[in-house]
Image (spheres, rainbow, N blue to C red):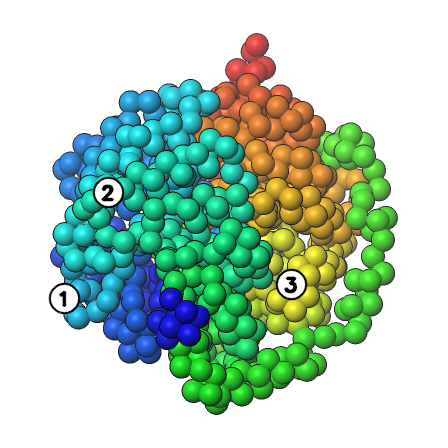
Amino acid sequence: MTSKSAAAAARATVYGYPRQGPGRELKKAVEGYWKGRVTAAALQDTAAELPRTNWQQLTDVGIHEVPTGDFSYYDHVLDTTVMVGAIPQRHRAAVEADALDGYFAMARGTQDVAPLEMTKWFDTNYHYLVPELGPDTVFTADSAKQVAELKEALALGLAARPVLVGPVTYLLLAKPAPGVPADFAPLTLLDRLLPVYAEVLADLRAAGAEWVQLDEPALVQDCTPAELNATARTYRDLGALTERPKLLVASYFDRLGDALPVLAKAPVEGLALDFTESAAANLDALAGVGGLPGKRLIAGVVNGRNIWVNDLSASLTTLGTLLGLADRVDVAASCSLLHVPLDAAAERDIEPQILRWLAFARQKTAEIVTLAKGLAQGTDTIAAELAANRADLASRAGSPITRDPAVRARAAAVTAFDTRRSYPYRQRAAAQRAYLKLPLLPTTTIGSFPQTGELRTARADLRASRIDTAAYEERVRAEISEVIAFQEKTGLDVLVHGEPERNDMVQYFAEQLTGYLATQHGWVQSYGTRYVRPPILAGDISRPEPMTVRWTMYAQSLTSRPVKGMLTGPVTMLAWSFVRDDQPLADTARQVALALRDEVNDLETAGTSVIQVDEPALRETLPLRAENRTAYLDWATEAFRLTTSDVRPDTQIHTHMCYAEFGDIVQAIDDLDADVISLEAARSHMQVARELAAHGYPREAGPGVYDIHSPRVPSAAEAAALLRKGLEAIPPERLWVNPDCGLKTRGWPETRASLENLVTAARTVREEISES
């Protein structure tokens, strides 16, 4: 096929779409079901209506082929676990008794059964449920969900493409099940898994699927020879099936690397590749393997992870180059649009000048449709869109909103001296022990406490002007008083104020820093029913005035025990925002670090002796390719030290991380030079404690003993058992006792019981140590 005919065949598509609905209808329905206020039938009706609405909206704007199977009650990897029958033994009875309740039990756990481990989806802030596999795992096909969604779309007269997590990625995301040796490699189960995928593909073909998309984002990482061989074998075997739809293998988040030639020669009908900035090397690599003759290429030229308008002219240039490299070139976003908010047009409080720079999911689908039209019919047919796009890009590039000379001068003046503590850890630790006088195995929490209905009502009343600021702040003071009183009564050693004034750990600070924009409706799924509104980093960053000192000092006035100052670190402020793409991330991180450094200094001056700077996104933001990691970790750890280095030796600096694979960044954790780090460990069975010990980590650590992402209350005996496991790796004089993460999403009854058990466990183990 000639380039001209390839262009004429260009179509617009997407890999996935936001699940929640414009009013977060899915969240409300699922949480209502958990609380018994919504029936299973009503929940299922909502879950059926939302994808139908999405498909219709996509079709109405000109998307030619809609995705099915990307919708989920909780998580698409968990859906894949159900599809392949890899239900953990401890959950099988619940799944057999009631499939829906059993599904949520795997996601959230029950009082008697622990949930699946949860961790980050590659380098995003989306969390998936980790498959648990072992030598005895038996896979069985259950394609009911995938087939039903496809049939629904086809019945509406739509061209639809089911989207599945690919078998190689599924196995590479999995971990050994509890009790299985840690060196077990789930990839060794490939020969058992492929017949199940073959059965699912046959079911989808029988249901009317012309194409099925198999997502293999794991292949954009550094692949071993065994992983490449497994990929070749997977698509050789699936491609050889007679009863199957056409296969489209998709990758995203980075360049495909060594896996590209493997997939290019595999007997599949198409590939979907990322061609945005982080994966631009895919273009040359594709030409280097001779293109994809006779195959379909879906070109991800619209950034599916950020919210800035696309440079349509640049994307058309890329698409034009690709025309000669495939039999057919279609246009898409670089990945599922799950990672961006739904609709920028819903934002009423953002200046119109800035709003024109933004593209959420609906705007991105319009960009995809425009690009496909221009590719198929010529740029003359989209002349008006191109002219408007050039004006939008010029407006942003020339706006004074984006640059502050004073901020840039301060950042340029930073030296290595500014990023180092004045005393080594050993001297700091002695000074802190003398000043704080904490017991062995000190207890604390991560920061937030449950946000009560009264507090949420007060916040809504303030927004609606039903109460004034004074009345709202009185409610906040009451919440802080309750939190402090509870912690004192329970016996926690280092207290927190509970953060009742904060809507989100990033947004709260972004709203008080120059250069940031907050949205009203920009919700993005983080995990399950947890949605966040990432702020938008549009310009240079500075802190006009203190952000946390007043509330921290109020809490400290209520107790003689130390109250932690609580801040969000610079890397997490970037990772959980939509960052600017017009300067290096390292430059932006330094600006944020300097703003936070001012806050740290003000907290210390006000008398705060323990300051926690959370960096849960440090591992999440780690580049997927090893070649890019050293540079990232250098500027990321420097930004943390720049935030925290200008304090006295007796001021104790804490940090916190959760739900990531920490073993990859233990040296970076060391390089932060924090005095204490708290980490998620309950679901991963103290794995991180062993990783810290293997590294020889010399400072204090609190691997969590209470999984806060489950409603179950861990017993004192369970917490004590985890503590003892932690003590196998970390000596008692350096071990802290704390939950995995903040308590904002939990209710007060379970929080009270869990923390009381945590303190009891700490006391029990202290006594055991003193008697030994």
Q: Nearer the viewer, mark 2 or mark 1?
A: 2
**Label 3 element class:** loop
Query: Which residue is found at the position 61% from the left and 67% from the top?
Result: 580
Q: Nearer the N terminus, badge 3 or badge 2?
A: 2
Q: Amino acid at mark 3?
A: Met
Other-residue count near label 3 (Cα within 10 Å), few / some / many at <14 / 14–19 / ≥20: many
Any part of residue 348 in sight: yes
Give the percent coordinates (x, y) of residue 451. 43, 56
Distance Cα–Cα, label 2 vs label 1: 27 Å
Residue position for label 3 = 547
Q: Which mark is residue 121?
A: none
Q: Does the residue at mark 3 contact the one at mark 2 (Cβ under 8 Å)? A: no
Residue position for label 1 = 155
Other-residue count near label 2 (Cα within 10 Å), few / some / many at <14 / 14–19 / ≥20: few
Any part of residue 315 in sight: no
Compared across the picture, whether 65 is left or right of 119 comes to left
Q: Nearer the viewer, mark 3 or mark 2?
A: 2
Q: Say which quadrant the C terminus sits in.
A: top right
Q: Nearer the N terminus, badge 1 or badge 3?
A: 1
Q: Say which quadrant the N terminus sits in.
A: bottom left
Give the percent coordinates (x, y) of residue 228. 46, 37
Residue position for label 2 = 241
Q: Amino acid at mark 2?
A: Leu
Q: Nearer the viewer, residue 111 or 619?
A: 619
Q: Nearer the viewer, residue 380 or 569?
A: 380
Query: Which residue is found at the position 39% from the left and 62% from the top?
Result: 327
Q: Does the residue at mark 1 contact the one at mark 3 (Cβ under 8 Å)? A: no
